[in-house]
Image (spheres, grey):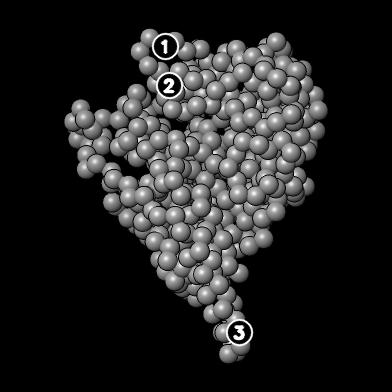
């Protein structure tokens, strides 16, 4: 495995007295105990990426060619997730002009505490990276880099697809438009998009669409090539249909073909196509695509390092449900802006009240289907919210994640290439939660 680790060094706490030193040691010991307790699930040893020089040569060997038909299957997905613009049609999100905004590194002492907590807690970070096919991850404390890792050929300039993390970018755009009055979340989806009348979405409110509270006759089974979600992915160019399977011409055609099943607003139902309905609503309400809003209102103001990409369908529609590709640090900039309650790079990019509403979460009573470990979780504006822990998450298949811990001013970004949509390690969530909490305890 090709591994690059950036040397990280920057602000900690002035420990000037013996009492303060003892206090720090006790906190570090507590963090280590916490990690050792929670990381009891044995790691699953993943097979290394096969030693095939993907897309190398003029031309590449047939077995080394990454095609649209197999770009989400191993070992091809490792290369494809870092080169999505070479596999499927995309639209560029322009970064703007001028230098990138700073993401400074943390103090040496803070880095040592972080690394010591991992080692003393018995957390095998290299094993975690290998078992979970991690391509890159970033840990920020107070907006400063505590750890930054690159493997599997990825580097700081790589734009890695974020899959359904893109839903949370879309939800943030929609939340901003609602706050400004450009979008009314009390109105029906069919009011904005008449073509949705008679579909699953026509009589749902915009808020119900934003919070995945639409009752849809739909299967989100990723392992079934004939399921509704895979039919959607074929249209979105995020997969190739089996022989003999026909697909809709475009995303909008697919969305309006879905039918209602049950009553809206009763329970959370994760449906990838619901995010696409939201993207359509945003475009009709404002006369601009959701990606245009993201580029102009948020992305360029972050002063990112590189342009980004969004996948488009055969009609040129910019996918809202999971087609964004960014560098690791540029995802970190977006996450840190939210951790700062909308402020980044010396300006208030989002109003504080927009972030506050996302942080407040939705109605936990609607939450019945996702395996979080507490009963205080909800989903709102396309974000997963743990209100008790004050943590907000965005997640995507094949191991993409943003985690914002507000109590501890901590951000974790992960980009991965799991062999399938689901985690390869049965203990993934337990180990991930343990990692986040132990790091927070060590750096508090």
Above or below for 73 versus 248: below
Q: Residue 94: x, y in percent?
A: 53, 38
Which one is nearer the viewer's eye here, 326 or 18? Answer: 18
Task: Answer with mark 2 or mark 3, whichever residue precedes in sequence.
Answer: 3
- Up the image or down, 70 lies above or below 373; here it is above
Contact between marks 2 and 1 (CB within 8 A): the answer is yes
| Quadrant position of the C terminus in the picture | bottom right
Cα separation between marks 2 and 1: 10 Å
Comes first in the chain, label 3 or label 1: 3
Q: In the image, is 250 to the left or to the right of 197?
A: left
Question: Considering depth in this image, is 305 or 406 the residue closer to the camera?
Answer: 406
Element type at marker 2? Answer: loop
Residue beneath disc 2? 225
Residue 319 found in image quarter = top right
> Which of 377 and 351 lies nearest the eye of the viewer?
377
What is the number of the mark on residue 245? 1
Q: Residue at horizontal 73%, vertical 24%?
A: 264
Q: Residue 26, percent across and down?
A: 56, 78
């Amino acid at each position: 495995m090709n591994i690059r680790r950036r040397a990280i060094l920057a602000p900690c706490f002035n420990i000037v007295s013996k009492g303060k030193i003892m206090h720090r040691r006790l906190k570090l010991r507590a963090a280590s105990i916490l990690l050792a307790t929670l990381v009891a699930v044995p790691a699953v040893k993943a097979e290394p990426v096969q030693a095939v020089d993907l897309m190398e040569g003029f031309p590449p060997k047939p077995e080394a060619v990454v095609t649209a038909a197999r770009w989400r299957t191993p070992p091809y997905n490792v290369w494809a997730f870092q080169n999505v613009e070479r596999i499927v049609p995309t639209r560029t999100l322009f970064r703007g002009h001028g230098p990138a905004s700073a993401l400074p590194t943390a103090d040496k002492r803070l880095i040592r505490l972080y690394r010591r907590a991992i080692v003393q807690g018995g957390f095998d970070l290299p094993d975690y990276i290998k078992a979970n096919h991690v391509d890159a991850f970033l840990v920020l404390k107070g907006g400063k880099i505590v750890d930054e890792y690159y493997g599997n050929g990825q580097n700081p300039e790589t734009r890695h697809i974020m899959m359904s993390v893109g839903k949370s970018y879309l939800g943030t755009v929609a939340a901003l438009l609602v706050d400004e009055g450009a979008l009314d979340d009390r109105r029906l989806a069919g009011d904005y998009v008449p073509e949705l009348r008679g579909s699953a979405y026509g009589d749902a409110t915009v808020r119900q669409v934003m919070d995945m509270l639409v009752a849809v006759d739909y299967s989100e089974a990723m392992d079934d090539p004939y399921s509704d979600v895979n039919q959607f992915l074929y249209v979105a160019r995020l997969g190739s249909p089996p022989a003999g399977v026909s697909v809709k011409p475009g995303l909008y055609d697919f969305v309006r073909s879905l039918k209602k099943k049950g009553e809206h607003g009763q329970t959370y139902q994760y449906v990838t196509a619901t995010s696409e309905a939201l993207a359509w609503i945003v475009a009709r309400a404002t006369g601009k695509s959701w990606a245009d809003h993201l580029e102009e209102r948020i992305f360029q103001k972050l002063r990112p390092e590189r342009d980004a990409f969004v996948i488009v369908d055969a009609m040129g529609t910019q996918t809202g449900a999971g087609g964004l590709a960014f560098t690791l640090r540029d995802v970190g900039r977006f996450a840190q802006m939210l951790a700062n309650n909308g402020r980044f790079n010396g300006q208030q990019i989002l109003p504080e009240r927009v972030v506050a509403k996302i942080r407040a979460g939705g109605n936990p009573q609607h939450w019945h289907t996702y395996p979080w470990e507490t009963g205080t979780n909800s989903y709102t504006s396309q974000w997963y919210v743990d209100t008790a822990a004050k943590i907000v998450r965005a997640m995507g298949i094949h191991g993409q994640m943003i985690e914002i811990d507000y109590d501890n001013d901590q951000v974790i970004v992960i980009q991965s290439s799991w062999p399938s949509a689901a985690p390869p390690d049965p203990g993934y969530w337990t180990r991930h939660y343990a990692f986040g909490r132990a790091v927070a305890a060590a750096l508090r």
